[in-house]
Image (tube, rainbow, N blue to C red):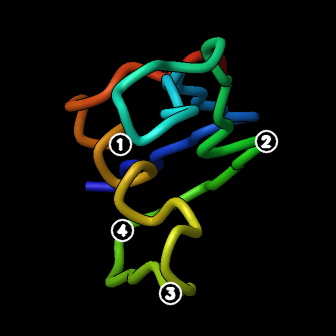
Amino acid sequence: MDTTFILDSLCKTYISHIPMLPFGKNARPQVKRALSGVSLTLTPGLYGLLGPNGAGKSTTFKMMCGLLVPTSG
């Protein structure tokens, strides 16, 4: 079975509210970009994702599995 998995220009952004004061008031919503322009072509084999904390490994994997919907791509 020769199956190729292709991701092209995958992007994911989140809108978050950052606390402005310790009393629970929120600042304006902030857009956080988790991934930007990720492109992969995977053929059958064994792969792993390596990178520092916050690099987007889990977000990429969740989008590959269909658990998260990409913002674009």
Question: Between 16 and 41, which is closer to the camera in this rendering?
Answer: 16
Is 3 on the left or on the right of 13, as rendered? left
Q: The disc labelled 1 sits on which kind of residue?
A: Met
- Label 3 vs label 4: CA separation? 19 Å
Residue 49 location (% of width, % of height): 45, 79
Is 46 on the left or on the right of 40, as rendered? left
Residue count near mark 4 (Cα–Cα under 10 Å), binned few <14, some 14–19, many ≥20: few
- Label 1 vs label 3: CA separation? 16 Å
> Which residue is depicted at the point 49% across and 23% down?
17
> Which residue is depicted at the point 41% across and 42% down?
22
Question: Between 52 and 42, which is closer to the camera in this rendering?
Answer: 52
Residue at the spot of label 3:
50
Label of residue 37 in the image: 2
In the figure, 29 relative to 19: above or below? above
Q: Secondary structure at mark 1?
A: helix
Residue 63 location (% of width, % of height): 37, 37
Residue at the spot of label 1:
64
Q: The disc labelled 3 sits on which kind of residue?
A: Leu
Q: Residue furthest front?
A: 23
Residue count near mark 2 (Cα–Cα under 10 Å), binned few <14, some 14–19, many ≥20: few
- Label 2 vs label 4: CA separation? 23 Å
Mark before the other along the chain sequence, 1 or 4: 4
Question: Between 15 and 45, which is closer to the camera in this rendering?
Answer: 15
Residue at the spot of label 4:
44
- Label 2 vs label 1: CA separation? 14 Å
Mark before the other along the chain sequence, 2 or 1: 2
Screen quadrant of the N terminus: bottom left
Q: Which circle, 1 or 4, is nearer the viewer?
A: 1
